[in-house]
Every structure is written in C-alpha cells, then in structure tokens.
Image (spheres, rainbow, N blue to C red):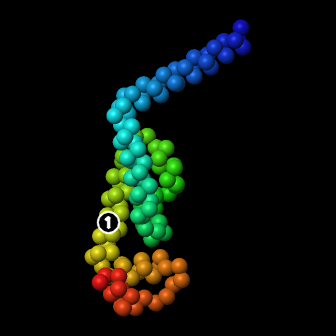
Amino acid sequence: PEKWMAVITTKFWDVWERLWTIRNSVKFEPQGATNDIAQLNQEIVDIYKQSPLIRMMTLGPQTLFRGTISDKQKYSFRKKKKWVRDAKVILDGFHEDQKKSKSVLYFRKYFSAKRRKVITTSDISKDTG
C-alpha cells in the first residue's frame, strides 16, 4: 500500500503544481500581455545591442547585465519589466556621463579600443563634430 500511495501522491502534486502555474499565469500575466511580452523581449535584445562594454561599468550595473539575452527573456513578465526599466536608467546614466565629461569619453574610448592607441584631440573632434 505504501508504494501505490507514493505514486498517487506524486501525481496529485504534479497536478496541483500545474494548476498553480496556470493560476499564476492568468492572475499575473493577463491575456493581453502576450504582445507586451514580445515587446519586452525585443527591448531586452535592443538594450544588449546598445549596452557598452560591461567591464566599463561599476559593479552594480555589471550584475544587472550578467547573463545572456535568453536568460533575461526567461524571466517572468514583472521581472522583465523591472529589468528593462533598470537597464534603461543605467544606460541613460552611462551616456550622460560621456556628455558631461570629455575625460570620461577619452577614458572609455581608450579602454574599449581593440588596439589601444593614444587618442588625440583630432580623433575626438571627428567624433563630436
């Protein structure tokens, strides 16, 4: 009797887990959210394309960008939404730093170059002009 009870109990747990998953998807991810999910997935891809080199970021943002695009796309709807919002704030701040300070721009240009060379003011004027 113990063996068949274990089998039945396991099957009941599987059914309850499936029901709980369905319940959560209905409650927290409404039917109209399908387009929103696709849009968030595309935003994740776009953010990774425009994101600067992770090694140039401070430790906080580095942890946010750790992992692959597919890892981020597997997040729940709420977590994706929060990640996209946080990533946009970080990228905006990253680009604002470059606009405010030329030395930050020079530093990032130097360390992001494949072959490091001395950056002259003529190189910079080409980029900003």
Q: Compared with residue 14, is residue 51 higher up or lower down, i.e. above or below?
A: below
Q: Residue at x 32, y 65 (%)?
A: 93
Q: Residue at x 54, y 83 (%)?
A: 115
In percent of width and height, residue 105 lies at 36, 79
**Mark 1 highlights which residue?**
93
Q: Name the secondary structure under disc 1.
A: helix
In percent of width and height, residue 63 lies at 46, 58
Q: Outermost residue toward the top? A: 1
In percent of width and height, residue 38 lies at 41, 44
Q: Which residue is drawn at 42% across and 64% down?
A: 51
| The C terminus sits in image quarter | bottom left
Q: Nearer the viewer, residue 41 or 20?
A: 41
Residue type pointed to by label 1: Gly
Q: Residue at x 42, y 61 (%)?
A: 61
Q: In which quarter of the image is residue 5?
A: top right
Report whether residue 7 is seen.
yes
Q: Which of 16 and 46 is in front in this view?
A: 46
